[in-house]
Amino acid sequence: MLRGTTVTGRRFHYSGSLAAGLVVSFKSSVMKITPVTVRTIRTEIANRSPVLMGANRKPRVRNSVGETLYEKHRVSPQAMSYVLPLLIEEGFCTVNDRKPFVIHRNIGDIHGPTLKMSFPSAREVKERLACSLEMLKTDDEYLFRKNLNERTFTHKLAEHLQCHFSGWHVDCEYNRDGTVPKELFNLSSCQPSKADEDGCTVFPDIIVHQRGKSGDGEPTRNLLVIEAKESKKGCISNNSYDAEHSRDYEKLRLYKKQLGYRHSAFVIFWVGQDYAACELDFDPK
């Protein structure tokens, strides 16, 4: 069981995460807060900052995020008491220290990380990625049914990931390692060009990282690298010997070994069906 502190200083116990949803425990009951509610709160703060918090059930605070939760989504404004402290801890926003509590979206979060963020756990990274895929399937089902280009999928997935990785950059086909071209060595499917010398320039589909170098001169902080493919049939296990997928798995292993990515993932977007479906292989061996 995890512990948090509300903006008024009251301690609370909870399980789960912002990405997977929260269960807040009281003496004789619990409050379940879904990932959809967390996402709604993020969106309201991002679009309306500065905005009133409004965690009161009665009387509800006018023009607040809490009021919107109840009026438009029939969610108790009390959810703000437990979600907001975790968003603040994540670096997504800040709040003043006295009533009325006004939430401000972090400017540094809008324009890119300005601080050296701590690395989330493997479980948290996987949960955030899985939640982003669920958002993609819900919000962008049209893309799956109409069999759009793979880059369309990766772009939209990156947008959803950014919601869950405040304080980190989420980039598509980013070919820099710090300030130099991103290269992999001993990649079996690649013959280096003269410009590449011994390595092959690579463009990972999506990465979660902090660009350039941190203020203390450490190398780029690389959290997650994703390779993705769209497919009309099968799943990862059935395609494990496919040459193209094998190359992606090889690149993921080298990204972690040579470029220091903490985690990797292979994603398949199933297209051309009447429903949206994805396959995720997190930290493949």
Image (tube, helix red, strand yellow):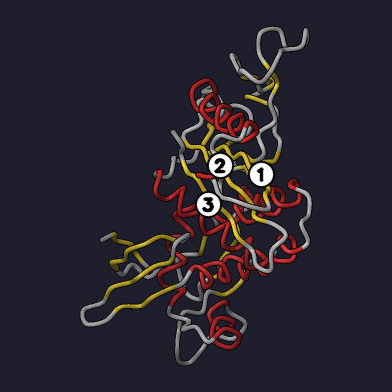
Residue type at tag 1:
Lys
Which secondary structure, mark 1? Answer: strand
Taking depth in this image into account, of 70 and 227 the one nearest to the observer is 227
Quarter holding the C terminus?
top left
Residue tagged 1: 229
Q: Residue at x 70, y 40 (%)?
A: 172
Q: Position of residue 234 (x, y in %)?
A: 59, 51
Question: Which one is nearer the viewer's eye here, 78 or 51?
Answer: 78
Q: Residues within 10 Å of mark 1 (few under 14, many from 20)?
A: many
Rounded to the nearest whole Å, what is the CA distance between mark 1 and mark 3? 16 Å
Q: Is residue 217 above or below residue 64?
A: above
Q: Amino acid at mark 3?
A: Leu
Residue type at mark 2?
Phe
Say which label, 1 or 2, has the lower sequence index: 1
What residue does disc 3 label?
129
Give percent across and percent down for residue 235. Answer: 56, 49
Do callouts 1 and 3 mark residues in contact (Cβ within 8 Å)?
no
Point out the image quarter for the N terminus: bottom left
Nearest the viewer among 270 and 15 is: 270
Q: Separation of disc 1 and disc 2 at Cα?
A: 8 Å
Please tell me which of labels 1 and 3 falls first in the chain.
3
The crowd level at tag 2 (other Cα within 10 Å; few <14, some 14-19, many 20+) is many
Q: Going by the image, does 201 lie left or right of 63?
A: right
The residue to which callout 2 is attached is 266
**Image point 22% across, 82% down: which residue?**
28
Q: Residue furthest left?
A: 27
Count residues near mark 3 (Cα–Cα under 10 Å), then give few for <14, some for 14-19, many for 20+.
Answer: many
Check disc 3 and report its element: helix, strand or loop. helix
Residue 88, image x and y in percent?
Answer: 48, 58
Q: Are marks 1 and 2 in contact (CB under 8 Å)?
A: yes
